[in-house]
Amino acid sequence: MSGMYGFRTLLYKEILRFWKVLLQTVMAPVLTALLYLLIFANVLGSHVQVYPGVSYTAFLMPGLVMMSILQNAFANGSSSLIQSKMNGNIVFVLLPPISNFEFFAAYLIASIVRGLVVGLGVLLVGLLFTELNLAHPLWVLAFGVLASAAFAAVGIVAGIWADKYDHLAGVQNFFIMPLTFLSGVFYSIHALPAFWQTVSHYNPVFFMIDGFRYGFHGVSDVDPWLSLAVVLPAALILSWIALQLIRSGYKLRS
Amino acid sequence: MPPAIRLRALDKRYPAVHALRAVDLEVAQGDFFALLGPNGAGKTTLISLLAGLAKPTGGTAEVMGFDVVQHYREARSRLGVVPQELVYDAFFTVREMLRFQSGYFGLAHNDAWIDELLDNLSLADKANTYTRTLSGGMKRRLLVAQALVHKPPVIVLDEPTAGVDVGLRQSLWAFIRRLNGEGHTIMLTTHYLEEAEALCERVAMLKDGRVVALDRTANLLRTGAERRLELRLTPAVLPESLSGRFIERRGERFALALPDYTELENVLAELRRADIRIEEMELRQADLEDVFMKLTGQGT
Ligand SMILES: Nc1ncnc2c1ncn2[C@@H]1O[C@H](COP(=O)(O)OP(=O)(O)O)[C@@H](O)[C@H]1O
Ligand SMILES: [Mg+2]
């Protein structure tokens, strides 16, 4: 009887959970991102050029992909956990001999996968509308996975903490949305007044998007190594917090 | 051979309630054990602590000799719990749920046993049905199946027959009895005291988080409450001379203690002297309900 099998089953179940409702969990966010792309690219496309030789639509794409990754990585773990808590079926995963770390890892990885699947969907659909370089695929992968992990961890924390859907909506509206929108998805922060540039430098999402964008275009606002130096610790610290919360039993094992 | 369940001074305080007060309890392997008590007595709390769903504020709990906190993997893999709440996961079918549950316990190929469970719990035709479309009784039986996927030596059922109709209740008990016959230890809570009386060899009664009785069912029935004489009288009054025997009054019916049959004559004489007519008379052996009422001061 291998201990790993419990973890693998939980991971599979968590992935199947969103895969079964693909329309809501993948198609809908891809469509949302596509609408942003069409509207912003059409309105601004001919007037704005952020980096030389890169069309606005191509500039926008990595930001939109990253935004979709973050929102969906967050949404996956948080909605799964709150649904299970409110329904009470969380006991099905609390009764078996699954360790805290396995529990954490299964929810985290499933959420990373959901984030990346949606991100990939946005990317593929976006490619119908614009050409996109892939200057440094490893940077793309690194920032995609790490950013997804960071927000997956935040989703786990929020899902454990929240007692009702309102609480999650609060986190989404007052934390996730401002962080992602004030991070240079739609613009280069060099276009901002000095004050807001400074503010953006305290937003880890800025580094996620900037590093991610570097992977595609080979140009960015800051050095990708600096971005990595922010995003990697952010992902590790947030994951560690999520793991400790699970270990503590907070709101899971009263 | 360690006991199937061993609780030592097990204690649980919630912010507002002291739900379990230093409970000591042992259930031997192979036992068929009932945990009884009025609502809020702490039965579900006790089970939650045993299952690791809640953390004790004092004392220890062991399953088959494994501490549920220190050695939670060993303890949990030996325990199957049917929760009181009728919970289900609407995303999945019956078979999917049972395969997941098997997987969580480390079992990769469990379909033969899953099918046997489905057969025994009359769910075979529902294997590919989404759980949200099951009736309450079916959901309850699915919970039983989920608790048994890993053939746990210790099976705990928290009100397993609530909402299950009579016919299916019988087949459920037949199945549980068979599992007990095969060596599984059973601990259950139920509101139907006749069930506990008919099935369980040993009984613990909880009240306000304390064990107020713990004995073999037969002993409890013998010593827990007197044999009782129930009378309907006209006029509906009891003569002063019989007040020493009075147990309770329900409507026009008086229940009197009658430890010895020879005293019946005496009671009848007293009633005749007071000119009170007997409309109905019943002499009854105490059942678990009476013991329960006496010890907890409440009905189920
Ligand atoms: N999670 C909880 N938080 C706070 N109080 C609780 C919790 N669970 C149970 N209680 C309280 O503990 C007491 C025992 O409840 P419970 O164990 O459910 O009783 P029973 O199962 O015997 O009906 C009750 O007063 C109940 O309100
Ligand atoms: Mg209960």
Image (cartoon, rainbow, N blue to C red):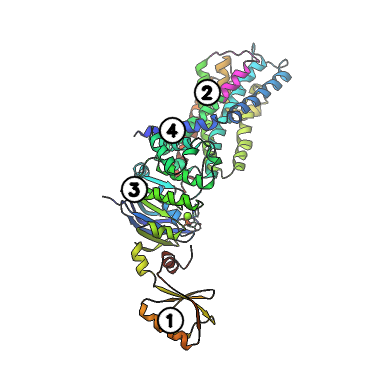
* Label 3 Cα neighbours within 10 Å, binned few <14 / some 14-19 / many ≥20: many
Q: Which mark is residue A143?
A: 2
Asked if residue A119 is among those painted magenta in the image, a careful observer would answer yes
- Quote the CA–CA distance across marks 2 and 3: 52 Å
How far across and how far down the image is residue A247, in percent?
43, 41
Task: For mark 1, name the chain.
Answer: B
Q: Which residue is mark 4?
A: A9
Task: For mark 3, name the chain.
Answer: B
- Quote the CA–CA distance across marks 1 and 3: 46 Å
- Quote the CA–CA distance across marks 2 and 4: 27 Å
Marks 2 and 4: CB-CB under 8 Å?
no
- Answer left or right for B280 relative to B10: right
Residue at (55% x, 13% y) in the render: A135
Q: Can residue B2 be seen in the rendering of this structure?
A: yes
When the figure is inspected, residue B16 is found, relative to residue A140, above or below; the finding is below
Mark 2 or mark 4, earlier in chain: 4
How far across and how far down the image is residue A19, in percent?
54, 29
- Quote the CA–CA distance across marks 2 and 1: 84 Å
Q: Which mark is residue B184?
A: 3
Same chain shared by disc 2 and disc 3: no
Q: Can residue B48 be seen in the rendering of this structure?
A: no
Which residue type does callout 3 highlight?
A: His
* Label 4 Cα neighbours within 10 Å, binned few <14 / some 14-19 / many ≥20: many
Q: Secondary structure at mark 3?
A: loop
When the figure is inspected, residue B32 is found, relative to residue B138, above or below; the finding is below
Q: Which residue is mark 1?
A: B244
Which residue type does callout 1 highlight?
A: Gly
Residue A45, quarter of the rendered image: top right
Q: Nearer the viewer, mark 2 or mark 4?
A: 4
Residue span colored magenta: A118-135
